[in-house]
Image (cartoon, rainbow, N blue to C red):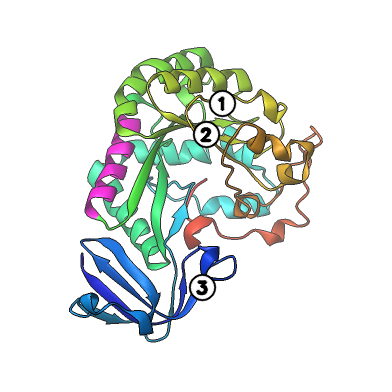
Amino acid sequence: MSDLLVTNIGELVTNDPAHGGLLGIIEGAALAVVDGSIAWFGSEGELPPGHLDLPIHDAGGASVVPGFVDPHTHIVFAGDRSEEFSRRLAGESYEEILAAGGGILSTVEATRAASGNDLFDDAAARASRMLAAGTTTVEVKSGYGLEVDDEAKQLAVAARVDAELPIDVVPTFLGAHVVPAEYRDRRDEYIDLVCTWMLEACAPLATFADVFCDEAAFTVDEARRILEASAERGLALRLHADQLGRIAPPTSLPTSERPAPTISTTPPPMTSPGCATPARLRCCSPVCPSRCGFLTRMAGRSGTGESRWPSPQTAIPGPHGSRRCPL
């Protein structure tokens, strides 16, 4: 609905301290939407008469808050990795499962086999659940095709979700998620593919490019090469780093001349000397704490990769409330 008057709002969160406090909360508020944009908000007693003819929605005293922005998701995928929970609880590590063809590689196999329509149906259902929980903007990564056509297929599905659902999708190209099984002994050839044909097909469908820079994925030098090639194609940059172990000082990670590159990380670096790096590099740095629980351990930061998670029994479901959502 492009025109709407929301009345009887118990608390309206404006995020503007001018309205009081850090959240800028207005009690007993109303909000007017005209042509799809917020035209007025404030105390309901001060509602301008010109908005009284708008269709009214009574909030019933509930709170009204800005929509949530989820900056790191994988909602376009196929397959089911729930059996990996029991394997992790039995002591297998994320890296061991990945080396045996599970983890990301398992989802790659299923996603390659799925049709675009099947991927859309599943992704739309996930996006609908996110909408119901208040998320209105979502970053969506590829990364489960790892070949030209299937990476483009994932991004096309993300665009369709954006077009057909009332949620804003920000698409990210993640062809450098891991090296696929068929290139395991030909890493350089795969990186060449990502930097040439894959980027040529996927850059027009994406806003960002991302690289998984970690012990089980890509080195710092490999990540720098891929991100530089992505920047040349006009993509803004993201970096998924430091999940399984510190592989290089954060200051050696590549940056972009484009504003606000993004580094997604797990909590430990926030307590290390490298925690100020995102600020020095003018980066936005989402923190993904639930990832540690999903992996059943927290990677050591001493360079040894030892577990810091107190007990494997503390494993929790993955993001978006679904144990089937892959990392």
Q: Residue at x 39, y 53 (%)?
A: 137
- Who's the residue at 67% across and 43% down the image? 93
Dividing the picture into quadrants, the one containing residue 56 is bottom left
Kindly report which numbered mark, 3 or 1, lies closer to the viewer in this rendering.
3
Disc 1 on helix, strand or loop?
loop
Q: Nearer the viewer, residue 139 or 93?
A: 139
Q: Mark 3 highlights which residue? A: 25
Q: Position of residue 194 (x, y in %)?
A: 42, 20
Residue designated by label 1: 255
Q: How many other residues sit within 10 Å of disc 3, few (<14), some (14-19) or many (≥20)?
A: many
**Relative to 128, is 112 above or below?**
above
Q: Is residue 84 visible?
A: yes
* Marks 3 and 1, how far apart at CA: 37 Å
Q: Earlier in the sequence, mark 2 or mark 1?
A: 1
Indicate the quadrant containing the N terminus: top left, top right, bottom left or bottom right. Answer: bottom left
Question: Is there CB contact under 8 Å for labels 2 and 1?
Answer: yes
Mark 2 highlights which residue?
Answer: 261
User: Could you classify mark 1 by the number of other residues whose Cα lies within 10 Å: few (under 14), some (14-19), or many (20 or more)?
Assistant: many
Q: Residues within 10 Å of mark 2 (few under 14, many from 20)?
A: many
> What x and y, as percent, mark residue 75?
40, 49
The amino acid beneath tag 2 is Pro
Give the extent of the magenta segment. 149-164
Q: Is residue 284 left or right of residue 118?
A: right
Q: Give the alpha-carbon distance from disc 2 to disc 1, as whole Å.
A: 7 Å
Question: Of label 2 and label 3, which has the lower sequence position?
Answer: 3
Is 19 above or below relative to 291? Answer: below
Residue 15 percent across, percent down from the top left: 50, 63
Camera-side residue of 305 and 26: 26
First reached walking from the N terminus: tag 3 or tag 1: 3
The image shows a total of numbered marks equal to 3
Q: Amino acid at mark 3?
A: Ile
In the image, which disc is placed on residue 209? none
